Amino acid sequence: MKRTALTFGLGSFFALTGGCATQHDPHALSGDEQAILGSAQDERAGHFAAARQCGEELTTSESFAAIRGKVELVRGADESVPADIAANDSYPTPAEGEAIAAWARARQQCQALSRATETVLPFTSRSVTLYWSQVWDINRGVAASVDALVLALSQGRLTYGEFGQRRCEIGRESQQIKMDLYQAAAAADNRRDEAGQRAALAAARDAYQARLRAWSSYLDTVNSRPIAVPQQAVVER
């Protein structure tokens, strides 16, 4: 298969899913360059497969049976919260708190596998590299915010319903920021407008930082609430 350099002119699927670039640069890579790129793509595909498998195991593990149906063990960023979860105004029991702590540890292992996919392929254009570096930064911030929500849930500072809805809001807002970033940066790149692309990246970064401050403020409020679950069940951070 002929491989070509990776450029920015991608679809929104690339922007939202973290998939590999597919748009072809006008110049084809040499044989040696194709081999280098192919090897890197294969390695990253292996990391993606490991991350997907980790997520699948989260949904089926009996370690989380006590909370299955009360939290979404794995969720897509643009999915709605199931009605039964959104309406659940109960707090975790001690046994459920222990299951949440185990889930949190497993989630962190999956996140580590996901971070292994955050590599720029050889011969990727500078604009794509800049775009993905910012997307990955957003993803890490979202993961940290959700980790904080999981900790608060395990402590009994959140009901299952509030946890589910806030987790959904964080995911949806971050997806919108990434979509805005993609559209602005791609348009600037198509015009070969490097200054415009930098401005688009800066605007998206500012929007993201504003949302981080809002999430942080909300979490400060949550963390001021009393702990309702015995300490042995609390997630270790």
Image: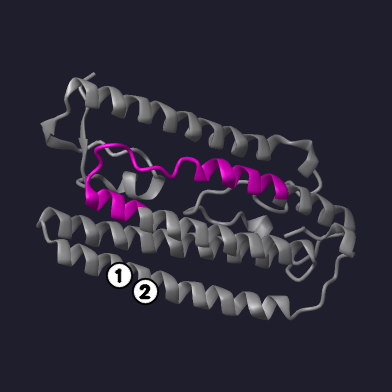
Residue 139 at x, y percent in the picture: 47, 56
Q: Is mark 1 on a helix, strand or loop?
A: helix
Residue marked by disc 2 = 206
Q: Is residue 122 magenta?
A: yes
Do we see residue 162 in this rendering? yes
Quarter that holds the N terminus: top left
Q: Which residue is drawn at 52% across and 61% down?
A: 142
Q: Can residue 88 be seen in this view?
A: no
Farthest front residue in view: 32
In magenta, the rendered stretch is 105-132
Q: Determine the residue positioned at 53% across, 56% down.
A: 80
Which quadrant of the figure has residue 179? Answer: bottom left
- Measured along the vertical axis of the image, is residue 184 above or below residue 2? below
Per the image, label 2 sits on a secondary structure element best described as helix
Report, in whole angstroms, how far the alpha carbon at label 2 lies from the one at label 1.
Answer: 6 Å
Quadrant in the picture for the C terminus: bottom right
As for residue 3 lying within the magenta part, the answer is no
Location of residue 40 (image quadrant): top left
Q: Is residue 27 above or below residue 237?
A: above
Q: In this view, does 43 lie to the left or right of 61?
A: left
Mark 2 burial class by Cα count in 10 Å: few <14, some 14-19, many 20+ = few
Measured as percent of width and height from the top left, residue 106 is found at: 69, 44
The front one of 127 and 161 is: 127
Say left or right for 176 vs 217. Answer: left
- Tell me the kind of residue under disc 2: Asp
Residue 11 pos. (x, y %): 26, 45
Disc 1 marks which amino acid?
Ala
Q: Mark 1 points at which residue?
A: 202
Task: Check contact, mark 2 vs mark 1: CB within 8 A.
Answer: yes
